[in-house]
Amino acid sequence: MPKFRSPGIVAALAAFVIVAAACGDEPTTGDSPTVEQDLLERVEERGVLEIATDSKYKPQSWFVYATGEWKGFDVDVAKEVTARLGEQLGVEITPEIEHHDWSTDVTAGSWNDRYDMNVGSMTVTPEREELFIFAPAYYFTPASLAVHESNTSVQDVTTDLDGKKVCVGAGTTYEHYLGKTLNITGYDIEYVIDDATIIPFDTDTDALDQLALGDGVRCDAAMTATPTIDQYVQDGGPIKNVGGSLYDEPLAIAFDRNAPIDNQSLVDAVSAIIDEMHADGTLTALSEKWYEGEDITQPST
């Protein structure tokens, strides 16, 4: 139902519109309207690149609370990309690395400007490409299964883990693999475990910690990247790799496709830097540093 307005109010509104229109016709003086920056311009102005990663993903990335330091392959990649970006822009850029939860913050997408990019070993999948823009892959990791070191029942992963409990990081490609829903462009995935009982935890390391409690205590196996299993064993964890590599996955720096500020120029700049780091051997050197002399910056097949 329309509401009644008095003639006085109508006249006042009309007068306001006329005055506003007249003011709008007058030439403006002083500063021009501010043009909204894109993300690369904002990074250049503030001198900080905000980077999300995982604080419990050794040897890719982890935070040493005793010293307040970030360490790992992903961390070194993030620092090198930041340094080269600063050189390109002619300003000093500082990498501000922060932990963000993988499943609830990072892979959920729509970061709402909380960070500029993720350097956290994210696998490129068609589903994620709907949420993220990816730079070229900076390395490729094999995926593997681990069992407790005391386990003797799992001799063949193609049969001995069917229907078993498998611990895994929530929101990871390993969880999708166990659920037989993993899709990586250009890769044929062969599923070898049927009817797994998937038990997700916040991070891959948490999954390995559960496996380390004992054979079958929380889970019969855990799944993650082979280097993560190898590092866990080196650190004294009572687990062992079983079955070898199941598949390789391309890992890339990710940017929010739904960012509230245009980030394409930052994507382009970082993509060019990754190509440069491949070409000049920097990524190979970092891989050999963190992965026992092994170069995993190129796919094995």
Image: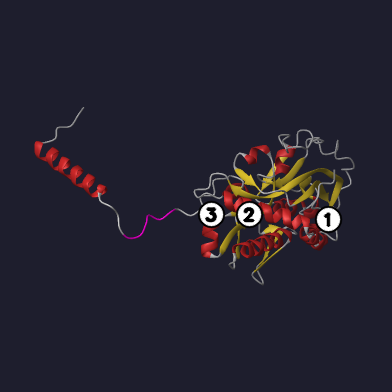
Report the predominant secondary structure element of the magenta stretch. loop
Measured from the top left, where is residue 269 in percent x and y?
63, 54
As measured in the structure, the alpha-carbon distance from the residue carrying label 3 to the one carrying label 2 is 11 Å
Of the pair 103 and 12, the residue shown nearer to us: 12
Does the image show residue 295? yes
Q: How dense is the environment of label 2, judged by Cα within 10 Å: few (below 14), some, or many (20 and up)? A: some
Query: Closer to the observer: label 3 or label 2?
Result: 2
Dot 1 or dot 3, earlier in sequence = 3
Residue under numbered circle 1: 295
Q: Amino acid at mark 3?
A: Leu
* SS class, disc 1: loop
Determine which of the numbered discs, if any, sits on residue 57 in the image. none
Left or right of 284 on screen, residue 28: left
Q: Is residue 77 magenta?
A: no
Determine which of the numbered discs, if any, sits on residue 269 in the image. 2
Q: How dense is the environment of label 3, judged by Cα within 10 Å: few (below 14), some, or many (20 and up)? A: many
Q: Amino acid at mark 2?
A: Ala
Q: Amino acid at mark 1?
A: Asp
As measured in the structure, the alpha-carbon distance from the residue carrying label 1 to the one carrying label 3 is 32 Å
Measured from the top left, where is residue 288 in percent x and y?
82, 60
Is 218 situated above or below 48?
above
Dot 2 or dot 1, earlier in sequence = 2
Does the image show residue 219? no
Specify the quadrant that holds the N terminus.
top left
Query: Closer to the observer: label 2 or label 1?
Result: 2
Dot 3 or dot 2, earlier in sequence = 3
Q: Which residues are magenta?
A: 30-35
Specify the quadrant that holds the C terminus.
top right
Residue under numbered circle 3: 39
Query: Closer to the observer: label 1 or label 3?
Result: 3
